[in-house]
Image: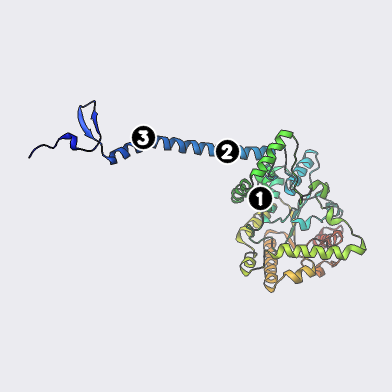
């Protein structure tokens, strides 16, 4: 057979200069060659993209940390005005002044009407109210550890417990994240909580918070103030108690204010128990029970007297919010508190009914917060053994 002329091959030709051998390039080989040429370019672009993204993220975190735009990260120049941070700073100031408290009050905003001055009248011990919004065992333990880290070993600790404080409502409650607002306080939180809190605090960084942070840094003065947020120093006394909950009201407007307050609390808390699955999550959780036990064990180790009370709610609020199952959960919590306190040598009183401390239905600010008179009655019932001559 004759040899086919090279001109009949309809493909491009190239010569291998080094070896002097003819090589025929097919479409597949051309594509492969191009892919090899483009691979380094793609890898370089990917690296550049990742580095650029990381730089942007780190810069945003740094700006929000330094500029305090989230009002959450522990900014050294623009400290948060959340109540956890404000009260932690106040305690540090008391320690520096040489006047650390000897009695500490822990709990949620429902204990902020407990007056340290009245505690001192009953016990002779100077006190401080460390109650914070929606406080729970995570806060109790963290706050007590914080006190010890400051070199403060109180002689007495009063813990006011809400009926839902031992439940699991992380998805609905961002208040524990505020522990990050004060670095020294945050370091005393349980490790598992630190991880969760740190993640949630980073998620609070937005374009808006970054813009506010940069403006704060530029003007050297904080401009941010959310409309629904008040300066804690304007709402709390120097001893940490709430001025608002101690204020009296004109007799003519008292019932209207109370009715409005009950409505607000019903709306807020009903959302946590409006479904059976949510309600069951409000049962005392092992995680919360563990933190409470750790608190009592630490207090016993440091010879601190502990008084624990289950707090009351307004009867109208109870009628509208408490289902039979929720009442059972509150009783379950009361039994748990009684047994646990007995185990660790703490004293417990179930003050969830007005009859248990001679309370008045009129001495409430809203559905869950009591005014001064009811708070003093609770303290008298809880600290009866501490009264002179008792």
Coloring basis for residues: rainbow
Please indicate, yes or no, whether residue 123 appears anywhere in the rendered image.
no
> Relative to 88, does residue 108 appear above or below in the rendering?
below
Quarter occupied by the C terminus: bottom right
Query: Between disc 2 and disc 1, whose residue precedes?
Result: 2
Q: Position of residue 345 (x, y in %)?
A: 70, 59
Front of the two marks 2 and 3: 3
Neighbour tally class for label 3: few under 14, some 14-19, many 20 plus, Cα within 10 Å:
few
Foreground pick, 244 / 110: 244
The residue that disc 2 covers is 56
Front of the two marks 2 and 1: 2
Front of the two marks 3 and 1: 3
Foreground pick, 245 / 144: 245
> Relative to 219, does residue 240 appear above or below in the rendering?
below
Residue at image coords 15%, 35%: 5
Extreme-left residue of the structure = 1
Neighbour tally class for label 2: few under 14, some 14-19, many 20 plus, Cα within 10 Å:
few
The residue that disc 1 covers is 177
Q: CA distance from mark 3 to mark 1?
A: 50 Å
Residue 37: which disc?
A: 3
Q: Position of residue 370 (x, y in %)?
A: 82, 61
Q: Position of residue 98 (x, y in %)?
A: 80, 39
Extreme-bottom residue of the structure = 324
Q: How many marks?
A: 3
């Amino acid at each position: 057979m004759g040899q086919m002329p090279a001109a009949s091959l309809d493909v491009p030709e190239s010569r291998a200069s080094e070896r002097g051998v003819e090589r025929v390039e097919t479409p597949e080989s051309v594509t492969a060659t191009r892919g090899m040429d483009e691979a380094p370019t793609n890898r370089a672009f990917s690296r550049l993209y990742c580095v650029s993204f990381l730089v942007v993220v780190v810069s945003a975190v740094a700006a929000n940390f330094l500029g305090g735009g989230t009002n959450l990260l522990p900014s050294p120049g623009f400290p948060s005005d959340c109540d956890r941070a404000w009260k932690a700073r106040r305690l540090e100031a008391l320690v520096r002044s040489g006047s650390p408290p000897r009695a500490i009050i822990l709990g949620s905003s429902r204990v902020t009407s407990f007056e340290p001055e009245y505690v001192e009248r009953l016990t002779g011990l100077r006190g401080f109210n460390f109650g914070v919004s929606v406080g729970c065992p995570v806060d109790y333990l963290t706050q007590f550890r914080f006190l010890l880290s400051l070199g403060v070993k109180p002689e007495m600790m009063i813990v006011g417990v809400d009926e839902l404080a031992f439940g699991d409502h992380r998805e609905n409650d961002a208040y524990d994240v505020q522990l990050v607002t004060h670095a020294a306080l945050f370091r005393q939180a349980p490790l598992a909580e630190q991880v969760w809190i740190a993640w949630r605090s980073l998620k609070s960084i937005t374009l808006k918070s970054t813009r506010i942070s940069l403006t704060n840094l530029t003007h050297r003065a904080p401009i941010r103030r959310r409309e629904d947020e008040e300066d804690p120093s304007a709402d709390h006394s120097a001893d940490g108690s709430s001025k608002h909950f101690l204020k009296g009201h004109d007799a003519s407007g008292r019932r209207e204010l109370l009715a409005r307050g009950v409505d607000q609390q019903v709306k807020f808390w009903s959302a946590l128990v409006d479904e059976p699955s949510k309600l069951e999550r409000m049962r005392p959780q092992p995680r919360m029970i563990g933190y409470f036990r750790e608190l009592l064990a630490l207090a016993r180790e440091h010879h601190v007297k502990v008084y624990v009370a289950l707090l009351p709610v307004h009867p109208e609020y109870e009628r509208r919010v408490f289902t039979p199952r929720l009442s059972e959960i509150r009783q379950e919590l009361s039994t748990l508190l009684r047994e646990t306190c007995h185990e660790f040598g703490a004293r417990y009183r179930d003050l969830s009914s007005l009859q248990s401390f001679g309370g008045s239905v009129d001495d409430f600010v809203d559905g869950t917060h009591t005014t001064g008179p009811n708070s003093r009655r609770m303290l008298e019932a809880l600290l009866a053994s501490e009264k002179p001559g008792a």
